[in-house]
Image (cartoon, rainbow, N blue to C red):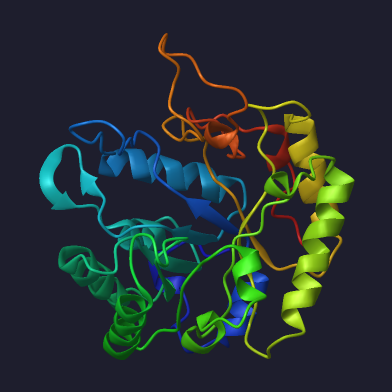
Amino acid sequence: MSTSPTSVPSPTAVPFADVLAQLCWAAYSPTNFDPTVTPVVSPSEEDVREDLRVLAAAGFNGLVTYSSAYTDSLKPGQPLDIPRLAQEAGFDGMIVGVWNPSDEAELSAAEKASSYPVVRGYCIGNEGLDERYDLKTLTTTMERIRRNTGRPVSTTEQANDYYENTPLWAISDWVFPNVHPYFAKRRDPREAAAWTAEIFETLNAVSDKPLIFKEVGLPTSGDDGLSESGQAQYYRLLRQTPVIYVIFEAFDAPWKHLTPLKADGTLAWPDPEPFWGVFTADRVAKEAVTGICSPR
């Protein structure tokens, strides 16, 4: 893995499909972030630096973000330059996320990120088609980012959305679905890994575009049959398959919930959403982290 910003190859030095297949990717939302309260709790640059240090020490060298609109808690109104911090931390690749395809400030920040060689591509939106944005807006924004940055561009919906007669294949430079065995009622690690591999084989046969699963994992708590050991076994088994994937996710996110908190402030049941990380929200490694980025 690279150890300095200058060692990151240019975006065109390695074929994009190889970059997707060769790096150890983590889906990343900063710790010390909570968008569910008013005002929003934002991370600081030092929070992000420490997050990235922990991930790099575990062997991660690819980063996938969801938004380009994070601001620095210590510098109100100033955007967090996560691509710069990722490059300084020695990451070899980054897929820059845009949460809101209609937010001009977020789009501008995303476009500026293309000045960093670590930025390999862009993902516009995440499970928001026909809910948070429409197809025309999504397509227009993807074309703009592709034109203005010279990088490959994709979007993300759930795996089942790619089985139908959908434009998702045509508008994307690579295929980037979210694939969750938990929501398919596969919690046993062996069944979950086999199911994930089956979905990959099915989708990979449809197109010659590169395919990588953007979100793949098992939560470690919040429902019956979930544990750190189950998550760790799932990733160990998945490494024995041809599936190319992003680990979902880097850190637990206590602010995420399937349903609102109960009146007494406790979690409803089941509620696995806060527990998808391979690290806790305090950056403590879970069992899955050991060997998670070792060569297959």
* 181 to the left or right of 54: right
Q: Quadrant of the N terminus?
A: bottom right
Of residue 253 and residue 82, the one placed in the foreground of this image is 253
- Res 110 → quadrant: bottom left
Q: Position of residue 135 (x, y in %)?
A: 38, 77
Task: Note whether residue 90 is visible.
Answer: no
Q: Position of residue 178 (x, y in %)?
A: 60, 60
Of residue 11 and residue 144, the one placed in the foreground of this image is 144
Image position of 199 with respect to 179: above or below = below
Looking at the image, which residue is at 26% across and 87% down? 148
Total of numbered circles in the picture? 0
- Res 161 → quadrant: bottom right
Looking at the image, which residue is at 79% across and 32% down? 229
Q: Quadrant of the C terminus?
A: bottom right
Image position of 265 with respect to 62: above or below = above
* 268 to the left or right of 217: left
Of residue 56 and residue 101, the one placed in the foreground of this image is 101
* 289 to the left or right of 3: right
Q: Residue furthest top?
A: 264
Q: Position of residue 172 (x, y in %)?
A: 49, 83
Q: Position of residue 60 (x, y in %)?
A: 58, 55
Image position of 188 with respect to 108: above or below = above
* 30 to the left or right of 173: left
Task: Note whether residue 246 is visible.
Answer: yes
